[in-house]
Image: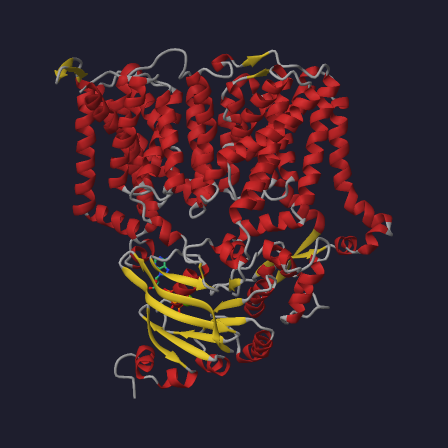
Amino acid sequence: MAEVQRRKERLDRGIKVRAESIYAVSSWEEAAYLLAPRIILVLGLLLAPLLVQSPYWKRVVTVVCVYGLLGLSFDFLAHFVGLVSLGGALATGVGGYASALANKALGLPVFLSIPLASLAGGVVCTVLLLPCLPLRGVYFAIVTLMYPLVLSRLVEAFNILGGTDGIPGVQGFGGPWAESYIIISALLLCLFGLRRLVNEDLGLILRGVKDNDQAVKASGISVTRYKAIAVFIASTLGCLAGAYLAHLYMWAGLSLFALDFSILPIAATVIGGGGTLVGAVVGSMILIPLSELLREFGTLRIAFYALVLMGFIVVRSEGLMVWAQRKYHQFERWVQI
Amino acid sequence: MNMDKPLLKVEGLSKTFGGLQAVQDVSMVLYQGEILGIIGPNGSGKTTLVNLITGFIKPDKGSVKFRGRDIAGWPPHKIADLGIVRTFQNMRPYYSLEAYRNLIVPLNSPRAKRMGMGRWGERDTVALDILEEIGFERDSFVPYKKASALPTGYLKRLELARCLALKPEVIIADELFSGLSASEIASLVPLIEKLQGGGITFIMVEHRLRELFSLANRVIALDFGTKICEGSPKEVMANPRVRQAYLGPGGSD
Amino acid sequence: MEIIVYGIVNSVSLALMALGFTLVYGISRLPNFAHGAFYILAGYLAWVGIRSLNMGYIVSVLLTIFVVGILGMAMYRFFLIRVRGMPISEIIASYAMGLFILEALRWKGLKGMTFTLPVIYPGTIFLFDVPVDYQRLLVVAIGAGIVAGLWLFTKFTRLGLALRGIAQDEQAAMMLGIDSDAMATVATGLGSALAAVAAIVLLPLGNIVVEAGYQVLIFAVAVCIVGGLGSWAGAILASFIIGFAQILTVSYMQSHFQVVVALLAIILTLIAKPSGLFGRQKQLEERV
Ligand SMILES: Nc1ncnc2c1ncn2[C@@H]1O[C@H](COP(=O)(O)OP(=O)(O)OP(=O)(O)O)[C@@H](O)[C@H]1O
Ligand SMILES: [Mg+2]
């Protein structure tokens, strides 16, 4: 008996095709189709601090956003430039210390020290990583894995920047509302900014570097230069997250170089769906609250992330948002072949 | 072609991989406006020679002079910036980008900007213009398809389009015709002739000898990394060493 | 003199830590980032065998090596095999595996209280007026023994030759009927078992702590990268370079610098000569 052979056929929904053309502005249905997911995300994030009551969960919302930023930074580098960085903690550490210094040593207020520390930290991280940019794949991943470790050991060994005690007494935000909305707006800004960027000329070059760096070289473009730009953008995001954390905890210390900041954003991105940017944010929305529930298990949390990460990688899951976007934009049917 | 205007001068170029002498003491001259063919059996070092000239591999010995300036050992993007661009034998498009967006990348290069290939906001149009010139039907879906969905013929054209986006002086085409049908080649030939007429100099590495010989002004033959003969297509075809290299010993009659 | 003696001991310790990692990478191009975790796991298992289950030293040790080897094989067979050929996924997956083991061990109580393994033969002797305890001599002896053993194994046994074949040219070896996946399984098992051996010889010199797991991974990676990924001779030479560099910095500065030296060695190597001292991948990798 002949086995019936089937395959899944995927077709774009009519509304998607229409919404991509100029008619999108003329009909509220297409406009709604385009805007609904964005509005849900934006409103959800903006309302979250209002909806949760306890200061504890308000804090969780901010931490979600921090990891969302780090996830964005990882996803951008990994899926749009092809640089897989296992050392996100480098940026958080550099940004955190930079902001603490700007605040304590230069006396800058929060609203200046965070942006300044993000940019300066971005420059520092880029300069540190500059020698590794010609490296590919595995090598780049290994070196980036080492960087946060080296820096934290150096701080310890030379006993600089407060050594193991860190820098206490960093200025706080002065209230839960400022605390929440600063990071939420930063996250939304970065998310939509990056989504825009990857379709601009700069973003296309970076995606070219990922697809095929030889062809980029053959086009008379310096690959290292564009990788440096990409690393700067990604590190700035990471430093922003680190600077925010330093002010949130009113302390900058070695824990800013902790493994969590490297591994969790990766897990969040893998779960949320790499290459979608928004996936990294959604992934942190899932992982962080979950890990708060696991708080009583202490460091077993990391083991738990590791397990989740392993699971997702091994079943080669496409990730949540890739799946969701596909379902939203396409319908599927089985066809006989 | 202009015999008294050498554009590119290669002298004593050599490269070994481990123990393998991939290119050995090759010298050649490229004149302004000509089409120079390079032929040779598989593994004779043609691609390696291209890589050496375009900076993708650093030569062990020898010099490459472009308008009198030694560019041997320069990084590839600097060489491309001078206007010496190449296609890849195994095509290298940006698979995740649409065909026209594949050209946005070279259009953003310093050279393209210098040469006035479209400012910000115009680049899409310029990209579509180039694609149309090279045989992508403008009003069809083809230019908007992801490169991963394009058949070989279009990918080969895309390789050439990438070169054109840089307003090149020299195009080094590595096996542009292989993998194409006779009719596809027939549609590319006039294009290349037109480009040559527009002042672009070509080096064409080819296995499709018949098509190459109708295009090329001069031909160089390589075997085991050394240049075995040089001359007009007729002379090269008649050369016993070339026949031997292609057909093996004893096949020269 | 002191520096030379301790330098040698330290270098051989590094080589011991790194051999398993190099072996796996050399044979199946698999960066086993769970290496450090297996090291600590082995220490812990041996401790459980000796101290909790009172199984006796020899039995515990042999059992530990065996169990860890099997675990390594299982990790490849059921897990890493599914991300084979995707280097980044391989790193992330094996690193996640290692994290899982280490952090689970930490939770299990591998902190606070000190866990130590017994030395095999207590005592110290004077070598050129430098006091060296027997365990450190044993480290050197076993290190040399393992290197010699591996050399003989790959030169003269069928399995060893098959492994070498895969290492040199996977495609060709597969065409000759060597099962690449089976060899990779064997390699990960062997590599993990080597991690266990290293743990059993080296851990009596310190405490079994989770941090050491990360440290061993860093050292192993450092040695392999400096020596050229997958090259044994390179790894051994690199162990000596890094080993002596460490002893020198430690004797003039503080012990914090041990890891810093390793990390700097990696970074400097990657910048100066990414393929390492004896690497031969670079040219093949960049085929245009
Ligand atoms: N990066 C490299 N590393 C080692 N060997 C190489 C490398 N690139 C090429 N070779 C070897 O150099 C020789 C010449 O190769 P090359 O690609 O230049 O030949 P070719 O003339 O282009 O052949 P084909 O007609 O098949 O394209 C071959 O034996 C090839 O295996
Ligand atoms: Mg070739």
For the point 60% across and 44% down, the residue is A275
Instruction: Pick the quarter of the image with the C terminus of chain B.
Output: bottom left
Q: Is residue B30 left or right of residue C61?
A: right
Q: Is residue C272 above or below residue A115?
A: below
Image quadrant where residue B185 sits = bottom right
Instruction: Find residue A19 and report its horizontal and vertical position in percent.
Output: 78, 52
Instruction: Find residue C79 and report its horizontal and vertical position in percent.
Output: 43, 40
For the point 75% across and 19% down, the residue is A177
Q: Is residue A175 left or right of residue B28?
A: right
For the point 19% across and 28% down, the residue is C142
Q: Is residue C91 above or below residue A53?
A: below
Q: Is residue B232 above or below residue C35?
A: below
Ligand 2 is in which quadrant of the figure? bottom left
Instruction: Find residue B232 and report its horizontal and vertical position in percent.
Output: 42, 82
Image quadrant where residue A172 sits = top right
Q: Give B213 or C41, whichever is nearer the viewer.
A: B213
Image quadrant where residue A191 sits = top right
> Is residue C108 visible to the viewer in this orientation of the structure?
no
Q: Is residue C91 left or right of residue B102?
A: left
Q: Give A122 or A334, whichever is nearer the viewer.
A: A122
Instruction: Find residue A210 and report its horizontal and vertical position in percent.
Output: 54, 49
